[in-house]
Amino acid sequence: MRSPAWTWDELLLACALVVRNGWRELRVSDPAVTELSELLRSLPLHEGIARKLPEYRSVGSVSRKTTDLATKHPAHAGKATKGGNLDKAVIQAFIEHESEMLQAAQALEEGIGSGQLTLIPEQPDEIAEDGSTALEGRLLARWAISRERSPELRRRKIGQARKLGQALQCEVCAFDFSRMYGRLGDGYIEVHHILPLHIAGPRETGLDDLAFLCANCHRMCHTSHQGASWRTPDALREEIGTSAFGSV
Ligand SMILES: [Zn+2]
Ligand SMILES: [Zn+2]
């Protein structure tokens, strides 16, 4: 049995090492390689049987991956070592969105380090319909989705709105479930983190970090489009305003 292919999340972490190292490979003796090897071996991305292989994400394999990534940068002189299309896509994402990708790597490292991230079960929406992963990777998307489904957070946010006499309506398009669906929609609204986890960092959520959205606008805030895997409610409102069918 061979070690399973590297996933987006794993490549994101390895490529972050390469970027922090000035787009140079890292040797097996580098402590950062040992650290990443241990981190990757703890990730719930592959089946248990694969994770027991001695070669699986060993320091040697991590170091080799940093060579693959460093030599595939378009500015690298000389021949590239092997590596698949996913390697190239991750490199491209780092070239186009360096700070966002580095932030994602950091949030991922912190989430894994604290043990929080590895306990979250797979979420139904963590991979888009076309099979692609969000820019920030599958694990951070999983964490973000599970955190938005927290009944406690929802209860607190709705409680605050009720106390302030605010209607439970979408902050982008003003859709109101109870107006449309009567008693069936009474009290229904989706709760969304304005900034995604990999941008805001894994800090505790305040009620001001949350927005009310209808199901459609919520989906649009999370949809991957032209390299961006999320947008704020404000940005979405602006997009509706400038689209051909917009009402503004
Ligand atoms: Zn809406
Ligand atoms: Zn959301």
Image (cartoon, helix red, strand yellow):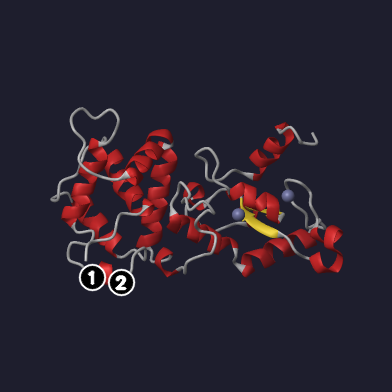
Give the image quarter of residue 60.
Answer: bottom left
Residue ID for mark 1: 52
Task: Point out residue 79 in the picture as x, y percentages from the top left corner.
Answer: 18, 33
In the drawing, does residue 241 fall left or right of residue 139? Answer: right
Residue 186 seen: no
Residue ID for mark 2: 48
Task: Point out residue 38 in the picture as x, y percentages from the top left corner.
Answer: 25, 61
Q: Name the residue rendered at 79%, 62% in the picture.
A: 162
Q: Where is 21 relative to 154, above or below?
A: above
Quadrant including the N terminus: bottom left
Q: Name the residue rendered at 31%, 65% in the picture.
A: 42
Cα separation between marks 2 and 1: 7 Å
Q: Crowding at label 1, few (<14), some or many (≥20) Cα neighbours within 10 Å?
A: few
Quadrant including the C terminus: top right
Q: Disc 2, disc 1: CB below 8 Å?
A: yes
| SS at mark 2 in the image | helix
Q: Amino acid at mark 1?
A: Lys
In the drawing, does residue 104 fall left or right of residue 230? Answer: left
Closest to the observer: 142 or 4?
4
Residue 32 seen: yes
In the drawing, does residue 203 fall left or right of residue 89? Answer: right
| SS at mark 1 in the image | loop
Q: Amino acid at mark 2?
A: Gly
Q: Name the residue rendered at 37%, 61% in the picture.
A: 112
Task: Point out residue 133 in the picture as x, y percentages from the top left corner.
Answer: 46, 51
